[in-house]
Amino acid sequence: MSTYRTINPRVRRPSSVAKPRKSIGLTIAMGLFLAYALVPLGWLAINATKTQPDLFSGSGLAFGDSFALWDNIVQTFAYNDGIFLRWLGNTLLYVVVGAGGATLLATLAGYGLAKYAVPGRKAYFAVVLGAIAVPGTALAVPTFLLFSQLGMTNTPWAIIVPSLISPFGLYLIWVYTLESVPKELLEAARMDGASELRIFLTISVKLLTPGIVTVALFAIVATWNNYFLPLIMLSDPDWYPLTVGLNQWSQQASGVAAEPIFNLVLTGSLLTIVPIVAIFIVLQRFWQSGLSAGSVKG
Amino acid sequence: MTALKQHAQAPERLRRPRPGPRRVRRDWRGWQFVGPFAFVFVFVFIAPLAYALWLSLFQNRLVGGNVFVGLENYRTALADPQFWDGALRVGLFLLVQVPVMLLLALIAALSIDSARLYASGLFRLVIFLPYAVPAVVAVLMWGFIYGNQFGLAADLNGLLGSDLITPFAPKWILASLGNIVTWEFVGYNMLIFYSALKTIPHELYEAAEIDGATRFQVVKAIKLPAARGAIVIATIFSIIGSFQLFNEPNVLNPLADNVITSYFTPNMYAYNLSFAGQQYNYSATIAIIMGLITAVIAYVVQLRGTRREDR
Amino acid sequence: MTNLKRRTILAGIPAALTTILAGIPAALTTGALAACGSSTEEAAAGKPADLDAALEKGGKLTYWTWTPSGEDQAKAFMDQYPNVEVEVVNAGTATDEYTALQNAVAAGSGAPDVAQIEYYALQQFSLSDSLVDLTQYGFADLEDQYTASTWGAVNLGGIYGLPQDSGPMVMLYNQAVFDEFGIEVPTTWDEYVAAAQALHAADPGKYLTNDAGDPGFAQPLMWQAGGHPYTVDGTDVKIDLQDEGTRRWADMWNQMLEPGLLAPISTWSDDWWKALSDGTVSSLIIGAWMPGILEGSVPDGAGDWRVAPVPSYDGSPATAENGGSAQSVLKQSKDPALAAAFLRWLNSSEESVDVFLGSGGFPSTTADLTSEEFLSVAPEYFGGQKINEVLVAASENVVPGFEYLPYQVYANSVFPDTVGTAYTELSDLNAGLTAWQETLVTYGESQGFKVN
C-alpha cells in the first residue's frame, strides 16, 4: 500500500493524524448514535418494571405508578409451571450443542480450505455462498418434510442440526487462517512427522483462538436469536427456545381466550437479552481481535 | 456428533502410512477438515434445495392430487404481479436501507477509529448491542414504540400538535421497517468496518503525518481503501439479508393490519403460499427464483468489488 | 409424537443418521404431500360402545389447545379416568396452531389426538381428510345439548368435532363515555353510525369503535346482515361477496370507514388494550366471550362497561357467531376411540364445562345457557347488569345458514391484500370485496375446486 504518497504535502497539521486529540464535538455528535441504539432498550427496561394494568395506562417512556420489576421477574419464572426456565434451558442446549458444533465445523472447514489445495475448493465456496442466497424461510417446508421423514421434527435435533452450518464462520476462519497460520510452521511440524490432525490440534488451534472465539460468538448469537426454524419445526412448547416462547406469550393477548401478559413478555424479553449481552461484554477482547484479521481481506 | 468425527478421521488413517507425491496426498487430506462441514451442509442445505427443485416441477391440489407440470410454476411466477410487487419492494428497500445503514456504520467506525472520541470503547459496545437483541424482541419493542395512539409516536405527535408521525401508515411502513433493520444491524456492520480499520499499521499514519495529510485525506487515501474488502463483504451480506426480509414484517404484521400484505416481501409470499395456502410447489418455485436473483446480484457485487481491488 | 419426545437426546442422532439413506428417497417420493394423499389408513369403523371400553382400557393422548382452562380440564379428566393420561400442549394460538397442524398432516406424523380448531377453519381440515367423522361413535345423539349455530358449525356432512364454546356477537359499550357525550345506546345501525359521527365530532380523539380491517370481524358482520357469500357443496364452491346481505353490511360500514369514524387500531394490539382502558374506543361489536376478558384485562374500565344486543338493520334482533372453537379428533390418532371418549367428556360433561365456565368462557351447551345460576350473574364490573341474559338472548338470535369456505384460513390470509386496501385508503369496501372474490376464485380453481 503506497497510496499515502499521493497526499498533498503542502497542508501541514502536525500531531493530529497519528496522535489526535479528543474532540467534544465529535463525541456529542456520536452521542446521538448512542441514543439511537439505547432508546428502545431503555424503553424495554422501563416497561419491564410495570404491572400489566400500568402498561395500559400512562406513557411508555415514564415509569408507572408501580415498580414491579422484581415481581415481574418472579412471575415470569413462575408462569405456567415455570415454562420460561425450561425455555431458557432449551436455548442453552441449542446454543451449547448447535453453536459449539457450528464453531467446530466452520473451524475445521475454513482451516482445511485455507491450508490445503482441496479439490473443488472454489466450487465449495461458490456453492456455500449460493446456497445461503436462497431464502431459508422458503426452504423451511422442504426441510420440514425431510426432517419429519427422519423423525427429527419436534426434537432438539431439528434445531441443532441446521444451526451447525455457519457460512460466515467458514469464511472468517478461512481468511483468518491465511493471515495467522504461517506455512513454514506447518512444514516444520510435518518434517517432524506429526499428523495433519495433530498439527491442527497442537499448533494451529492456538494461533486461531481469537478467530474461533469470534465465530463462536456469532454462532451463539445466531442460535440464541433463532426464531423461524424452531417456529416451524417444533409444536411442543417443551422444546421451544426463548424467542418462540416469548412470541407465543405475546400472541396470548389475542382472540377468544385472550389473556394479555405483556408485562411478562417484556420482562421475558429483557431477561433474554441480558445473558447474550453479558457474553459479549466479557469476551470483548477476543472477538475484536478475531474480526480484525477476518475483515482485512474481502 | 461422534459419527461425524469418525467420518472425518477414517480417510486419514487409511492414508497416513502410504507414501506418495505430497501434493496429491495433501489435497485429499484437506477433506478430513472440510468433510464434516460439507456433510452437514449437504444434509441441511443441498438436500432441501434439491427437494425444493423437485417440488417446483409439480402442482398439488386440495382436490385432485399431485400432477407433474414441468416448468409451468416458473412461467406462472415470472408473470405473477404479486411476486414482482414484493420483489420490487425489497429492491427499493435494498437501494435505500442498505446504503444508509452501511454509511452510518462506516461513519461510526471511522469516528471510533479516529481516536478522537471520549470513551470510544463505550461507543463501540453500545452501538453494537442491538445486534445481540433477538429480532422478535426488537420488533416487539419497536412495535410498541411505533404505536401512534400510545407509543413514542403518539408522544411526539402530541408534542408537535400534529398527527404526522404514523409509522404504520402504508407510505411509511417500509421506512419503519428499514429503521428496525438498521437499528439491528448498524452496529454489526460498524464492527466489521472498525476491525478492518484496526489492521492498518500505525506507521502508515505517521508517514501520512510527515507528508502533512489532513484527516479527511487520511480517510480517503488510507482508511477507505483498507476497508474496501470489508465493505464488499458487508454489502453482500446486506443484500442477501434484504432479499430475505421476513422476520421484521412478519412479527410487525399483527400491529399493522392490512398494511403488510401477504406478498409484502417475496419471502413472506413464499411463506404464506405454503403455510396458509398449502401451495408448497409454487412456494418452492418462488424461493428458487428469489435465490437465483439474490445469488446473481451478490455475485455481481463481488466481481465489481474485487475488480476495483485489482486495479 | 410421544415416542419422539421420549427419545433421549443422545439416542436421537445416530437414529437419524441410520435412517437417512432410507429417509431421503422416502421424502422425495412423498410427492403425495397432498393433504389428502397423506392421511393415514382409514380408521376401522368404530361404534359407540368402543368409547367406554377405551376409557376402561386407558392409554395416552395428546391434546392441542390454547384455551386457558385446557390444563385444568385435562386434570379433572385424569382424576376421573386414572387409566388415561392426557398431555396438554399449547402449540400456538389459532393460525399458529393450524400451521403446525397442517405441517403434521402434510408430513403424515406429529399431529395430536385431539386439537382445538375454530369453527371457521373446521371445514378446511375436514375437507383435507384430517379429521375423524365422529358419527360412528354415536355423537349425533349429542346434538340437542348444543345451540343450533354451534352444532351447525361442526356438522359438516359428518360430525367433525364437538363445540367447546360459542361467540354470539353483542355490543359492549362504555357507559361513562356515552353519558359524558350524551349518547343513547344505539339499537339500529343507522343510530350506531349517527352516534359514531356525534362522538367523533364532539371529541376528535374519541371513536365509537375500532376496525383496522380484520376478516375474523368482517365476516360475522356480513353474516349478521344476512349475507351468505359462500356456498359449499362438496368440491363445488360458490363465492359471491356482493350478495344482498354482504352489500348491506358493506354499504353501512362504508359510512363508518370512509369519513374516518373507525379508529385505525388493530384489535388485540397493545394500542387497542390501551384505547379500551382510557375510553378512546367506547364500544365493541364482539363475541359473547369478551366480557370475561375485558374484566380480567382492562381493570380501569370497572363499573363503566355495559352489554347490549348488536344493532340491527330493521329493528328485529339478529346476530352472528364471532369466534368460538370446537375440538376434533385427528385421523393420525393411534387410538381414535379413546380420543373421541375424551372429547365427549371434554365438551359435554358437566365436570368439564364447569371448569371451562369458571375460567370465564362462554358455553355452547344449552343446559348451561338456560341455567338460572348462569343467567342471574350480575358482575360489578358491568355495574351489576345481568349480562348473561343479554348474551344468552344473543345466542338464540344467530342468523342460521352461514357457511365458510373450505379454504378459509388461506382466504383470511389474503384479506389484507384486497379488502385491506379499502381500510388503509378509507375507500369503498365493495371494491375490496370484489378483488377478494377474484383472488378466492382463482385460488379455489388452482386447488381443483369447481368455483362459481
Image: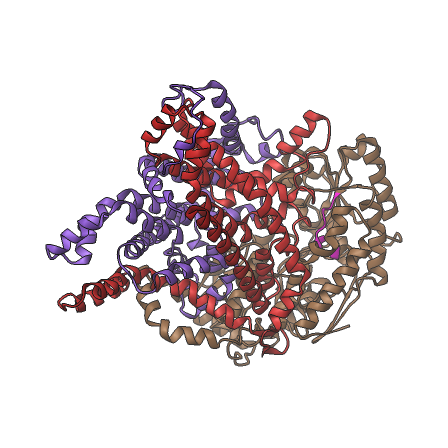
Chain colours: A purple, B red, C brown
**Front-most of A172 and A40?**
A172
Q: Position of residue B115 (x, y in %)?
A: 40, 25
Q: Position of residue B65 (x, y in %)?
A: 59, 78
Q: Point out the stretch of residues depicted in magenta.
A: C210-219
Q: Residue furthest bottom?
A: C44
Q: Is residue C429 visible?
A: yes
Q: Residue furthest left?
A: A192
Q: Is residue C319 magenta?
A: no
Q: Quadrant of residue C176?
A: top right
Q: Quadrant of the C terminus of chain C?
A: bottom right
Q: Position of residue A117 (x, y in %)?
A: 28, 60
- The residue located at (86%, 61%) in the rendering is C244
In the image, is C169 to the left or to the right of A122? Answer: right
Q: Quadrant of the N terminus of chain C?
A: bottom left
Q: Quadrant of residue B208?
A: top left
- The residue located at (72%, 52%) in the rendering is C420
Image height of C220 relative to B180, above or below: below
Image height of A250 relative to C413, above or below: above
**Front-most of A46 and B74?**
B74
**Front-most of B141 and B47?**
B47
